C-alpha cells in the first residue's frame, strides 16, 4: 500500500520540528545574583506541561477592540484550527499558511478589512529577567521584526506561577506597532542553585600564579642542566641540595617559633637557675 504525502504539509511539519528542536537553546537564561544562580528553560518539559511554555494549541491569542494579537513563545505558531484570515501576511507564511512563518502577529481592522502585521520572529527572540533585584519573579520575552515600513515588536511578561497557567487577558500598545502583554506560567519560575563558593579570589589567583612560575622554573632548569650541562638523573633538578634540605629547614623554623612562644619546657633549667646541694 502506497502512502501519498502532501509536499506542503511535509514542509510545514519539518519546519515545525526544527523550530521545536532549537527552542531549548533559544529560550534559556541563567542569571547570577549574589550566591544564587537562577536558571530559566522555557521550552523544557514540566510534569503537567510537556511542551514547557509553548501553547499546546500552537499559539496564544488575545483580542480587544477589533485587534487580535497572536503569538507563540520559543517557536513559530501552528494553526490546526482558527487560522488568521487577513491581508499582509506575506512575511509570516503567506496567504495559504498565514501565521505559520513567524512567532507574533497582529490583525487590525483597516477600512473594514483585517490587515496583518508581523511583530516578531523566533530568531529575534531576547530573554531577560523581569526584575534584576528579584530574579525569581519572572522574565520578559521580547521578539521583533524589521518590516518594510515599520519596525514592530512584542514583549511578553511571563510571571512565575507554580500553581498553573493563566493566559494573556489584555495587551497594551506602545508606539505605532509595539505591543506588550502578560501571562502566568510555571515555566516563568527559575530553578535556583545556591553557590556559596566565591571562587579563588585575588589571593588564590596569586598562589596559582606562583605555583605556575615555580613549575616553569623547575622544568626549564632541569632541561637546561640535562641537555646543555649533561647532568642526568635526579641531579638534573636545579638547586637539588636546597630542595632536599627544605623540609629540615622548615622543621627547625617551626620548632624555634614554638620555643619562642611557649617559653622553656617543664624540667628545663637555664644555666642561671639556682641549684640546691
Image (spheres, rainbow, N blue to C red):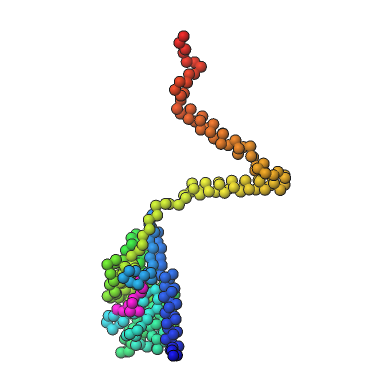
For the point 42% across and 82% down, the residue is: 13
Which residue is painted at 35% across and 67% down in the image?
Answer: 139
Q: Exactly how many numbered labels are in the figure? A: 0
Query: x, y (%) of residue 53?
Result: 35, 72
**Rendered view: 250 above or below 10:** above
Residue 260 within the segment the image draws in magenta: no
Which residue is the extreme one toward the front?
1
Q: Residue furthest top?
A: 277
Where does the N terminus fall, quadrant-wise? Answer: bottom left
Q: Which residues are magenta?
A: 51-62
Residue 206 horizontal side relative to residue 106, left or right: right
Q: Quadrant of residue 60?
A: bottom left
- Tell me if residue 250 comes above or below residue 264 in the rendering: below
Q: Which x, y percent locates residue 116?
A: 36, 84
Residue 53 is a magenta residue: yes
Q: Is residue 45 something that shows in the picture?
A: yes
State the residue at coordinates (29%, 74%). Answer: 167
**On the image, which quarter does residue 229 sit in?**
top right
Amino acid at each position: 500500500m502506497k502512502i501519498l504525502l502532501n509536499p506542503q504539509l511535509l514542509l510545514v511539519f519539518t519546519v515545525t520540528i526544527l523550530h521545536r528542536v532549537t527552542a531549548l537553546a533559544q529560550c534559556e537564561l541563567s542569571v547570577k545574583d549574589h550566591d544564587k544562580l537562577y536558571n530559566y528553560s522555557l521550552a523544557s518539559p514540566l510534569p503537567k506541561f510537556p511542551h514547557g511554555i509553548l501553547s499546546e494549541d500552537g499559539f496564544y491569542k488575545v483580542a480587544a477592540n477589533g485587534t487580535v494579537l497572536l503569538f507563540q513563545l520559543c517557536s513559530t505558531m501552528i494553526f490546526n484550527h482558527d487560522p488568521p484570515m487577513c491581508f499582509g501576511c506575506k512575511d509570516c507564511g503567506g496567504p495559504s499558511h498565514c501565521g505559520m512563518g513567524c512567532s507574533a502577529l497582529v490583525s487590525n481592522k483597516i477600512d473594514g478589512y483585517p490587515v496583518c502585521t508581523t511583530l516578531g520572529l523566533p530568531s529575534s527572540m531576547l530573554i531577560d529577567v523581569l526584575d534584576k533585584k528579584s530574579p525569581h519573579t519572572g522574565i520578559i520575552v521580547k521578539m521583533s521584526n524589521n518590516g518594510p515600513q515599520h519596525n514592530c515588536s512584542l514583549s511578553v511578561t511571563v510571571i512565575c506561577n507554580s500553581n498553573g497557567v493563566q493566559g494573556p487577558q489584555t495587551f497594551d500598545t506602545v508606539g505605532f506597532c509595539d505591543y506588550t502583554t502578560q501571562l502566568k506560567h510555571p515555566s516563568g519560575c527559575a530553578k535556583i542553585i545556591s553557590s556559596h563558593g566565591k571562587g579563588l579570589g585575588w589571593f588564590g589567583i596569586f598562589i596559582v600564579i606562583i605555583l605556575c612560575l615555580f613549575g616553569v622554573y623547575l622544568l626549564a632548569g632541569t632541561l637546561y642542566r640535562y641537555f646543555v650541562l649533561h647532568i642526568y638523573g635526579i641531579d638534573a633538578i636545579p638547586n637539588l641540595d636546597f630542595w632536599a634540605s627544605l623540609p629540615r629547614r622548615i622543621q627547625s623554623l617551626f620548632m624555634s617559633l614554638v620555643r619562642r612562644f611557649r617559653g622553656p619546657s617543664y624540667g628545663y633549667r637555664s644555666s642561671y637557675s639556682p641549684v640546691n646541694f
